[in-house]
Image: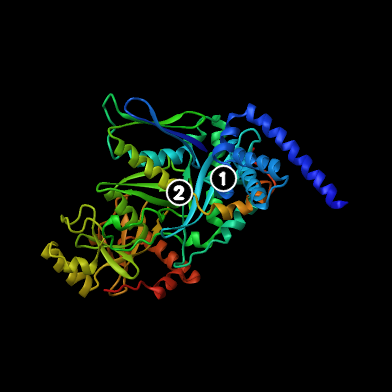
Amino acid sequence: MEIKLHHISRSSIKLFHRVRNLVSKFLDPNFDTFKKFEFKAVPIDQLNDIRKLRYVRNLELAESGFINNTVKEQLAFLKSRDLLFQKNQNIVPVGRISVHEDENKLIKLLLGYNKTEDKAYLSFTNVNNCPVWQNYTTSLLKETVQRLCPSRSDYLFMKHRYFERDVEHLDSGIQKKLCRLINGTIQNVHSQNRYLQKGIQPIALPLGKLSKLSNELPIQLKQGPEGLFVPVTIGKNFVVLTPYLKVANEKNRLYLSVQEFRSLLEQKSISFLAETKYGVSLGIHGNKIYLKVTDGGTNTDSLKQWTLLDDFLESKNAPKRLKYEVAKNLVEKRDFMVALDEIPIRPTNDILLLKKHYASGKTYFAVTQNGKKPKPADYRPITDLRNKYPLHYAAYLEYVNKADSLQPLRAKEKRGIKISF
Amino acid sequence: MVFEIKIADSTGRPILKDAFYMESITTMLDFSWGVLRPSSESTEENAFELFISSEMDCHIFYRFDSLGAVMQFKNALYGHLIELNETPSRNMENANELTHLNEPYKTT
């Protein structure tokens, strides 16, 4: 009885689809062409057109009254893909953020916006280059980004691109909102992954060829995340830097000459230590001494940039007289003074400047009067202060007593400055 | 985003008409101009013509001197599309469940 019912049901399906296919033959010329030339000639899993697969389903139902699993699965796949494509049609792509380890891209994240729904979307994957959009949630973003880790190094870096050509047809208010959204997402991604935070380019001194710098990893030019910049273009004469955690525009890009860029990097890494009597300034970085000509000092091309002391002494282009002065006074005698403190003298506008002689450890002073900066040769031993400037001496005593009670001076002396010559 | 690519021969007859997906107009322009910019555009009257458009606008119109140059661009584009299309079958497994996931994020 059951078999008979089943047979009747299958026959009615066959009959229904035969009639339907007959109608299709007249209404849809493509159907007839497909039936003649492609049906059974093309394997089902190679049919990527949902319309053609529906023809197959209808023809098979008319033939046998049922369809096999391959057709069902392929139809389900194409229907899902069709849904994705339809959804994508209403979403405007806003930007892309990708996370990399060296040349490997670990993840690509797309941001999108649906104007009708006023909703933001995220996509981490795509099908046939069509993004699989998900609703934007900070928790989903965090969860995905926190999982990323490097396999060969201990840092990652990001790249991002704002799709300005895609959003330009939107209202300016919406454009601003989307720019804020992508900036917020970039900062969020960065703050959620410690390997991304480690991805900062170290500045190795002395600076050799700038072209050796990576144009993908950021450099910390100022404090905080806002101070991260990527040197995207390093030309012969100029350098262009873009903010790492923001969409770049004409206002926030930095255009620097190579000279300006070099001094900026050096300023970030070399701390000024002392000015000498022989026309060069001393800088320190990692316990190593760097030399640079003092403004208005020695007329030489060789020390226009901070130069490592050893490199300067080995250089063949440096003036012999200056080399001799440096070797004798700096290396041999340690004859230079390190700034200690500045004491304002009230009610005058004078400032008492204190420096410590590196070799002897003795304190020297000079006075800034009417804002005029004293030269290194103007510094006198502190023992002369009482006779020359009694008012300043009283201020100095008060400073020493206060320093003793708080111990900053002693702590400074105790810590000292370690320099490797 | 869906784009239509159309290439016409020197008589104006279409020799290729196809559609492809790329993530955005900006990405398509970045790629296309990256390939096209190093060479100079044809000034000949009877040149091969390339059109790339979306439903919004025609974004690329470029004239080539020879069929070889057209094919070079076409091959570069199609090669790039294959590179971009990563692991489609694996992605598809999650596509349904991902489509309606999570609470919406309001940008207002």
Who's the residue at 37% across and 47% down the image? A241
Who's the residue at 34% across and 40% down the image? B71
Colour scheme of this structure image?
Answer: rainbow
Considering the image in quadrants, where does the C terminus of chain B appear? top right
User: Please, what is the three-letter code of the amino acid marked with disc 1?
Assistant: Leu
Q: Residues within 10 Å of mark 1 (few under 14, many from 20)?
A: some
Residue tagged by mark 2? B82
Who's the residue at 18% across and 68% down the image? A313
In the rendered image, residue A6, in percent from the top left (x then y), is placed at 82, 48
In the rendered image, residue B62, in percent from the top left (x then y), is placed at 35, 31
Q: Is residue A200 left or right of residue A205?
A: right
Callout 2: helix, strand or loop? helix
> For residue A360, which numbered disc appears in the image?
none
In the rendered image, residue A406, in percent from the top left (x then y), is placed at 50, 69
Question: From mark 2 to mark 1, how far is it between C-alphas?
Answer: 19 Å
List the single residue furthest toward the left. Answer: A320
- Report whether residue A124 is seen: no
User: Please, what is the three-letter code of the amino acid marked with disc 2?
Assistant: Ile
Question: Number of marks in the image?
Answer: 2
- Report whether residue B84 is seen: yes
Q: Nearer the viewer, mark 2 or mark 1?
A: 1
Q: Residues within 10 Å of mark 2 (few under 14, many from 20)?
A: few
Residue tagged by mark 1? A47
